Amino acid sequence: MERLTRRTTLLYGTLAFAVLFALLACTSAIGVLVIDRAIAADLHLTASEIPEIAARAPSADFSARSAYIVAHARRAGVDLSVRDTAPPMRDSVEGDFGDGPPPGGPPQGDGGGGFHDGGPGGPQGPPPDDHGPPPGPTGPWHASPAMVFSVPSEHVVVTGATVDIFPSADRLQQLALALLFAVIVGLVASALFALLIGRWLAVRSLEPLGKVVSELFRFGSGDFSERSIDDAGRTDYGDLALAYNAATAQVVRALGEREKAEADMRQFIADAAHELRTPLTVIDGYVQLLRGGIDPASSTNILDTIDAENKRMRELIANLLALARLDSQAVAPMLVTDLSTIVEAALDEVPFLGENNDVRVDVRTDVMVLCEPPAMKEAVTNLLVNATKYARGCTVDVSLKTEGEHAVLAIRDEGPGMSETDRDNAFRRFYRGEFVRDIEGSGLGLSIVDRVVTRARGTIALDTGLGRGTCFTIVLPLAPSA
């Protein structure tokens, strides 16, 4: 993870440095432009003063006139050179005021200047050409600054002379060194700042990934508690954090369901063992009596009891097998079936329903649903059997209709109803109501009904209360062909 952070820091830092370098280059260019304009303004100001100074200068001697112009027009950072443009009528005179130029360079120095005429006694070489290039900052001290600045110059023509005005080499050198120092400091600061920005961006962008890694290590250590990453979604790695949140929620949910299933299975096994042990105990007791020898009249009653307990045990085992099949992951083929035929078949098979209850049937035909016909028939039969056992002698209403895209089957009785506790636990396996424990039953009938309806993608609702009867309502989606 740290290596990825370093690589990401380098990437973000490089991008940040490129941006800062571009800003530094723009700033340097603007600085050079500002300096050029400041130098040009100084030269222009000096040039504007030259005519007035030249008018006051003595006109008899060129050397004195040049010295006067240089002395009165001098300005910090500006060099002047006075050239004699009169016809060559006398020997060349050359003077230097202020700081002289370095060997081989032009007159220079803050406030420095020079003058010469065009006579033959002047410097070696032919007289200056008035139409040639004017003197300027071309010496070795100006070479490097000239690569940075535009090195402007001004030329003022006065009576009998031309005054050349240009920035001093010292000024250009100082400005160039200051600009170079600023650029170096800016580069170093930009590199450090880019590194800090890159590190901050890398840590911030990789934070969700780091949390995912640490949480996965926690999962690998066996701690399966759910902990979501709150700042997911801020970066590209945030999508990974969102996926992690969804995956861990699903894992925790699956683990919770597995623990609940294991607890239910343990409870189921314990309840099944208890329910099976009761008839076996009865049968074993009566077998021992028969072996001990009893009168024939009593043996007939004992055999009847053994037969009843045997049937009860067979029914319990059949219900357990049905629940095991319904709980299996494999789904039996769903067939398009007319629910009305299933209801009518269940009505015909429930013993004593018509004898013990007043049954009213309102069943619409051609109500096609997708279900497992045998299992659905068993579910409807269990509901009708409950009415014969717990609402004996009461009216039972059976209705089947369609509402929109659903089939609605309702089985209502006017029996004693259920308490709130019985209603909340009615679909629990092996649960028997507190007032019906003396009525034969295994407590698995409603669990089977609930499982069958769920596998058919339907719902079952229970509406009951003490003294107001019981109503089971099954809602199933109609088959697409319907």
Image (spheres, rainbow, N blue to C red):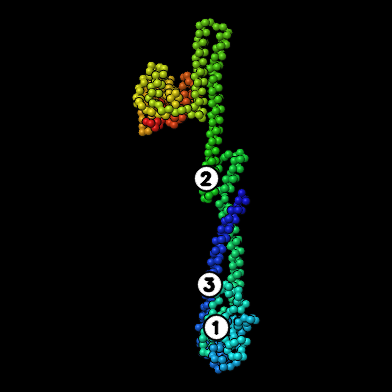
Relative to the observer, which residue lies in front, 379 or 394? 379
Amino acid type, callout 1: Gly
Amino acid type, callout 3: Leu
Q: Nearer the viewer, mark 3 or mark 2?
A: 3
Name the spot of residue 127 as percent of width and height, x first. 58, 88
Which quadrant of the rendered structure holds the C terminus? top left
Mark 2 surroundings within 10 Å by alpha-carbon count, few (fewer than 14), some (14 through 19), many (20 or more): some
Q: CA separation, marks 3 and 1?
A: 28 Å
Q: How many marks?
A: 3
Q: Quadrant of residue 169?
A: bottom right
Amino acid type, callout 2: Leu
Q: Quadrant of residue 343?
A: top left
Q: Which residue is mark 1?
A: 132
Residue name at image x 55 percent, y 25 percent:
269
Q: Do the numbered discs 3 and 2 sit on residues whose CB atoms are within 8 Å?
A: no
Q: Earlier in the sequence, mark 3 or mark 1?
A: 3
- Is 297 left, or right, of 368 in this rendering? right
Name the spot of residue 158 as percent of width and height, x first. 51, 88
Relative to the observer, which residue lies in front, 415 or 195? 195
Q: Nearer the viewer, mark 1 or mark 2?
A: 1
Please give the label number shown on residue 144.
none
Relative to the observer, which residue lies in front, 256 or 85? 85
Q: Nearer the viewer, mark 3 or mark 1?
A: 1
Q: Earlier in the sequence, mark 3 or mark 2?
A: 3
Residue 290 drawn above or below residue 279 = above
Residue 72 visible somewhere in the drawing = no
Q: Which residue is mark 2?
A: 242
Residue name at image x 52 percent, y 75 percent:
37
Q: Which residue is mark 3?
A: 33
Residue name at image x 57 percent, y 50 percent:
206
